[in-house]
Amino acid sequence: MKTPSMRFTSLAVIALAAGLSTTAQAQNAADAADSATARQKVAMCIGCHGITGYQASFPEVHKVPKISGQNAKYIAAALTAYRKGERKHPTMKGIAASMSDQDIADVAAFYEASGKDIPSPAAPAAPATPTADIQALLTKGNCMACHGADMNKPIDASYPKIAGQHADYLYVALKAYQTERNPQIGRANAIMGPQAKLFTHTELKQLATYVASLPGELKTVPQPKLRR
């Protein structure tokens, strides 16, 4: 036979369980809403970044970067730079200018998580040993100091993962850091500007080709995947 005290305790446990269940349901609903909101916000992105092998024609023909799996902090910093005009690119500036800080944060978080359930493209188990010439360029630019020894684990999330990124995109991006006083092209960055200017275009292309050959986590998630 239950005493009043026992009945009170049982009711309290039931009430607590019900409260926890309600809280969990509310959190799940909030997560679903956030996910739905994020998917709406990236609708403007998937036309380029959600198509495998998609090529842009400005400032020259190159594949758009893989951004699924990229650090959210870096994506947010890049979009903010486009919005401020510190990165010059007509299309990206137009898109970033339409985004609030919250939009940028949501899109960045979405792409950092995007594709984690999808295997990365087949790649060597270990990076190829760079030739003496490439190693000299890597040492000259001190690339590993920020992007990590494998170019896939930057020392800070505000720096991008670049291992396995498209070589032609890397080449265009590196040249943009060299470009000044051009209203349509260029990237202002206190670190990358001086570093990129150390190299000729031929050397930049060699670096880009090597970095693109490294195994990494970046990928392009096709548009149908984003609509699940």
Image (spheres, rainbow, N blue to C red):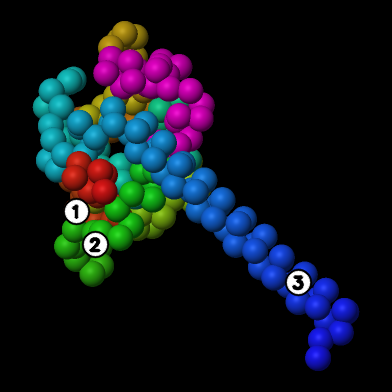
Residue 1, quarter of picture: bottom right
Q: Mark 3 or 2 closer to N-term? A: 3
Mark 1 or mark 2, whichever is nearer to me: 2
Which segment is the magenta one?
A: 81-108
Residue located at (16% from left, 39% from top) = 51
Give, as a three-letter code, the residue at label 3: Leu
Q: Mark 3 or 1 closer to N-term? A: 3
Residue located at (18% from left, 20% from top) = 59
Element assignment for label 1: loop
Q: Mark 1 or 2 closer to N-term? A: 2
Element assignment for label 2: loop
- Between the residue at mark 3 and the residue at mark 2, the CA separation in whole angstroms equals 48 Å
Residue located at (26% from left, 44% from top) = 226
Give, as a three-letter code, the residue at label 2: Pro
* Foreground pick, 164 / 12: 12
The answer to whether residue 179 is magenta is no
